[in-house]
Image (cartoon, rainbow, N blue to C red):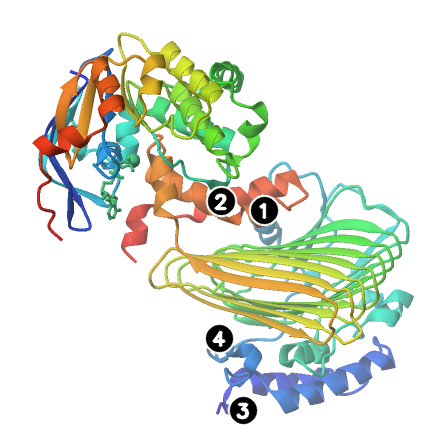
Amino acid sequence: MVNQHSIPLYQALLQAYEERFSGSRASEPDAIHKLRQNAFHTFQELGFPTTKVEDWKYTNVIPFLRENYTLSTTPQATATELEQAHQAAAIPGMDCYTLVLHNGQLQPAVDTNQLPAFLKVISIEEAMQEPSFQKHFGKIVDAGKHHFAALNTAMFTGGLFLEIDANSHLDKPLHIIHTYSSADNLFTQPRNLFVVNRSASLSIIESVVAPGNGATVFVNGLTEVAVAENANVQHYTLQTANEQLRNLHHTEVSQKRDSVYSGYTFSLPSAQLLRNNLHINLDDEHTETHLYGLYLANSKQLVDNHTFMNHRFANCESNEVYKGVLLDNAVGVFNGKVYVHQDAQKTNAFQQNNNLLLSPKAVINSKPQLEIFADDVKCSHGTTIGQLSQEAMFYLQSRGIGEDAARAMLVTAFAFDVTENIRIPALEEHINKLITQHIPAKQELVNV
Amino acid sequence: MMLSIKNLHAEVEDKKILKGINLDIKPGEVHAIMGPNGSGKSTLSAVLAGRENYTVTEGEVLFEDKDLLDMAPEIRAREGLFLAFQYPVEIPGVSNINFLRTALNEIREYKGLPPMEAKEFLRLTKEKQKLVEFDAKLINRSLNEGFSGGEKKRNEILQLAMLDPKLSILDETDSGLDIDALRIVSGGVNKLRNEHNSFVIITHYQRLLEYIVPDFVHVLYDGRIVKSGTKELALELEERGYDWLKESYPATETVH
Ligand SMILES: Nc1ncnc2c1ncn2[C@@H]1O[C@H](COP(=O)(O)OP(=O)(O)OP(=O)(O)O)[C@@H](O)[C@H]1O
Ligand SMILES: [Mg+2]
């Protein structure tokens, strides 16, 4: 049993809550104050999860939490930090709108592209009087159920509010760069709300970077996404942060009738800890959901993807493909839960998780979880764990392709089921390049 | 000499399969290798191409006077050796065209040549595609994935035509081909054939050898070449089978 009080961060959080959030705050509506209070009580009851908690069985966060962290950050990034962020997150050849959040704080626009009037992008603090904020904030995620979601709800600072008007279509992807850097160890909890109104459509690319080599940054982030009737969202997350980052992110989506949500999660080296919770609530009939994931982990990375497809209504379709490539001493976790409620007849739910182990010391824990309470459904899932095919390697080599190039080709090919579904060509090319970059030469594979 | 095999012994998983092969191939020559199932024909081609799990226990192979067995598979290919596989591998997610471009450019780099210009590459691909009547739609698909047997074999010959090797080994490229496909494949090989390059044609059927006329025919039996002759030998084998040869060369004990 872990004594929560033995974790300095836990103490620091209790104290900070008392100082900053326990009384009502002039800047925040009462509803938010109540939400924070309730969530804080939940967190006090739950504490940080140990590996005894089923959802955290393979991911021990406690050691990551034991470092000393400060809880406050400077609101504005330096010019150098911004430049590093742009460099680290650059996607060559991509035409897009760009925003930067530094340690969760929205930075003044440096981008020359003017955002169209139908798209509102403001900090979460500024958004609290917005009708859409009040309608959705804290209502999509159930903070009572999740340790870190409760903590985030109680004590979030910073983050982004984004809203696109009904019937609007964003002509270019919106690239949101989340950059983290700090001179002292930092624990930060940004909170985002994306509202996609009726029949609107857009593509969002969120890059998570931690350039440079500063102190440890632990992020406990949460994003709620409201997808209204007939809206269409492509939501990409690309995590390429350096080693000093530990990133827990909870994304909770609510989909209304006839909407389409496509979530893409790409986790690449070398953040020490990545935990992505992606929960999709199908809150009406006739929705379509695609979840694509690719994790390529090396060194001692721990990359954990937990997805939850919550089929609550009839006639909905979900399709999920996660692929993992594990190198060195990396540990991967995939937990994909599909829950089909009794009323969710005519559900089509498909899930697949394939893993490639390129090192004898790499580990994957894959656990599909189907819970089906309706009788007229089509559901399937599959998990594979394998190595590169020697036959395929030989075939490529026998045509003059060097061993290292052949290996990179096969890994890229393995990822193809995921990457071929990227709808932005520059992004697809970028991801394929990143994959190739991280496939080590034979020498390095052998010397692990 | 293009290829010189001397007393080659090889085994796989401690099973002796090649038991002393001797074969010399000069530039411009076409050699056919025939022999019953399991006699070691594919093993010989795999050993020549450098497949990892086959261990050479004795003998040597010189490819243009260089020690072939010392080279990694990709180096053998870059030096000009090509194996058309009996069973080409399907590789989902690797596009045929990218594969061809990568292979061609790796070989060019080895020879000190710059990567081929995109335009020139397309022209060459089109030309060779016509030569083997390879369906243009297949060129952008994943490598061999879902190809019919005949399409896979034609793809092997397309690769052969693109990479322009010095020595090509065709392992049962004719098996399972209908007569049209056979005509196309052998027509392609005949057009690629010249006084500088050589072919080893592994086949069970004399039919192919009417299209690609060999200079020599060898019979491989129980890991050894037990008879060599000219193209008439193929006819004789077709009529008489292999039993008359088996009788004069009793199988050696296989050690397990
Ligand atoms: N990887 C392997 N492991 C075990 N035995 C093998 C392996 N590869 C080949 N063999 C055995 O070696 C022998 C020769 O096989 P090979 O494929 O070379 O024959 P072949 O002459 O090409 O036959 P075919 O005409 O049927 O193609 C066979 O007995 C086969 O079972
Ligand atoms: Mg064979």
* Residue at screen point 35% across, 32% down: B85
Is the residue marked by circle 4 packed among few (<14), some (14-19), or many (20+) residues within 10 Å? many
Badges 1 and 3: C-beta atoms under 8 Å apart?
no
- For the residues beneath circles 4 and 1, the answer to whether they share a chain is yes
Badges 2 and 1: C-beta atoms under 8 Å apart?
yes
The quarter of the picture where residue B187 lies is top left
- Residue A145: x percent and y percent? 68, 82
- Residue A137: x percent and y percent? 81, 71
Q: Quadrant of the C terminus of chain A?
A: bottom left
Q: What residue is disc 4 on?
A: A58
Q: Amino acid at mark 4?
A: Tyr
Q: What residue is disc 1 on?
A: A419
- Residue B104: x percent and y percent? 40, 24
Instruction: State which chain disc 2 sits on.
Output: A
Query: Circle 2 sits in a helix, a strand or a loop, which is it?
Result: helix
Cα separation, mark 1 vs mark 3, equals 44 Å
Query: Circle 3 sits in a helix, a strand or a loop, which is it?
Result: helix
- For the residues beneath circles 3 and 2, the answer to whether they share a chain is yes
B153, above or below A257, in the image: above
* Residue at screen point 12% across, 28% down: B226
Q: What residue is disc 3 on?
A: A5
In screen coordinates, is A317 left or right of B63? right
Q: Amino acid at mark 3?
A: His
- For the residues beneath circles 1 and 3, the answer to whether they share a chain is yes
A123, above or below B228, in the image: below
* Residue at screen point 65% across, 90% down: A44
- For the residues beneath circles 2 and 1, the answer to whether they share a chain is yes
Task: Name the outermost residue toward the top.
Answer: B195
